[in-house]
Image (cartoon, helix red, strand yellow):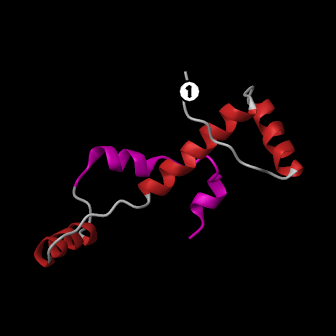
């Protein structure tokens, strides 16, 4: 059972847009808005992740990012797969 209320005002056009999208997903307005708001809030919070490194650790980290990948059978298989949107003619072009 939900215990906290969240109230907001919207333009009729905004309400109609939200209602239309919610109905397409088989949701009511409140469920749709709560789900969309929580997804956006999580994205904002995840974008705020910070980790600090001292100068030496940063150099090591940068070196690992700059180094070519080592032998990796899984990566080799993945890179050998032709993208579904690339035709045979496109894959032969330089």
As drawn, the residue found furthest toward the top would be: 1
65 or 89, nearer to the observer: 65
As drawn, the residue found furthest toward the bottom would be: 55
In the rendered image of this protein, does residue 30 appear above or below residue 66? above
Q: Quadrant of residue 37?
A: top right
Residue span colored magenta: 71-94
Q: In this image, 76 relative to 42: left or right? A: left
In the rendered image of this protein, does residue 60 appear above or below residue 18? below
55 or 93, nearer to the observer: 55
Q: Residue at x 13, y 70 (%)?
A: 57
Percent position of residue 15, x then y: 82, 44
Circle count? 1
Q: Residue at x 42, y 54 (%)?
A: 46
Q: Residue at x 81, y 37 (%)?
A: 19
| Residue 91 magenta-highlighted | yes
Percent position of residue 79, x then y: 42, 52
In the rendered image of this protein, does residue 59 appear above or below residue 74? below
Q: Which part of the image, by quadrant, shows the C terminus?
A: bottom right
Q: Residue at x 40, y 61 (%)?
A: 48
Percent position of residue 2, x then y: 56, 26
Q: In this image, 13 relative to 47: left or right? A: right
Q: Quadrant of residue 93?
A: bottom right
Disc 1 is placed on an element classified as loop
Q: In this image, 31 relative to 81: left or right? A: right
| Residue 16 magenta-highlighted | no
In the rendered image of this protein, does residue 30 appear above or below residue 10? above
The residue carrying mark 1 is 2
**Mark 1: few/some/many CA within 10 Å (<14, 14-19, 20+):** few
Q: Quadrant of residue 4?
A: top right
Q: Which part of the image, by quadrant, shows the N terminus?
A: top right
């Amino acid at each position: 059972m939900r215990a906290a209320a969240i109230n907001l005002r919207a333009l009729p056009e905004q309400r109609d847009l939200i209602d239309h999208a919610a109905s397409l997903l088989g949701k009511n307005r409140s469920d749709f808005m709560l789900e969309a708001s929580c997804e956006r809030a999580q994205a904002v919070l995840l974008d705020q992740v910070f980790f600090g490194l001292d100068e030496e650790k940063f150099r090591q980290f940068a070196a690992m990012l700059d180094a070519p990948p080592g032998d990796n059978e899984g990566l080799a298989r993945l890179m050998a797969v032709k993208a579904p949107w690339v035709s045979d003619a496109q894959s032969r072009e330089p």
